Amino acid sequence: MKVKIGTIVNSYDELNELFNTPMKAIVAMYVSSILEVVSKEKEAFEEKKVKLIHELGEEVHDDDGESQISVKEENMDEFYKKIDGLMEQEVFVCEEKINVNDLTTSNGDLINITPRCISKLKWLIEG
């Protein structure tokens, strides 16, 4: 299944929440493999974003003398256009969605998961 980078970025915290929820081993292994792929894709996106900030930005000093790179005002439209383009790219994440009924603990009870998590992970969880 292919997923847009923007979807990955916007649901990364919720995927980590799911990853940290106790569940049956077979589903946990599947979630773990998905998180591994998603983490690499998110890291690659973040690296490209930082590179864009450096390309389109300038060093700025705050009141404490600390410096950081910020996108120049005149380059903001180009920056957002390029970020939007990156976020629209699709990458292969997994073979199939996880059925919500498979998200069970070792004793067969459905796991506890927040509505926010379910909402953000609709690309991954069905049923």
Image (cartoon, rainbow, N blue to C red):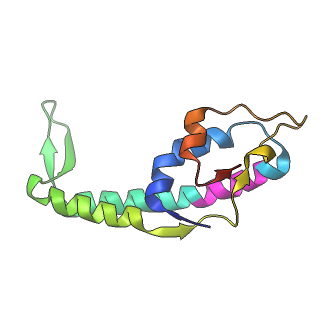
- Residue that appears at 60% across and 61% down: 37
Q: Is residue 92 left or right of residue 28?
A: left
Look at the image and tell me whether residue 54 can be seen: no
The residue furthest front is: 127
Task: Identify the image quadrant of the N terminus.
Answer: bottom right
- Residue that appears at 55% across and 55% down: 39
Q: For residue 46, what is the image quadrant?
A: bottom left
Q: Is residue 56 left or right of residue 41?
A: left
Q: Position of residue 51 (x, y in %)?
A: 30, 62
Q: Is residue 12 above or below residue 105?
A: below
* 29 in magenta: yes
* 4 in magenta: no
- In depth, the one of 19 and 44 nearer the eye is 19
- In depth, the one of 73 and 51 nearer the eye is 73
Look at the image and tell me whether residue 98 can be seen: yes
The residue furthest left is: 74
- In depth, the one of 110 and 58 nearer the eye is 110
Q: Position of residue 8 (x, y in %)?
A: 50, 55
Count the marks: how many?
0
- Residue that appears at 48% across and 55% down: 7
Characterize the magenta stretch by its predominant secondary structure: helix
Q: Is residue 97 above or below residue 2?
A: above
Q: Position of residue 34 (x, y in %)?
A: 65, 57
What range is drawn magenta here?
28-37
Q: Is residue 43 left or right of residue 73?
A: right
Q: Is residue 104 left or right of residue 92?
A: right
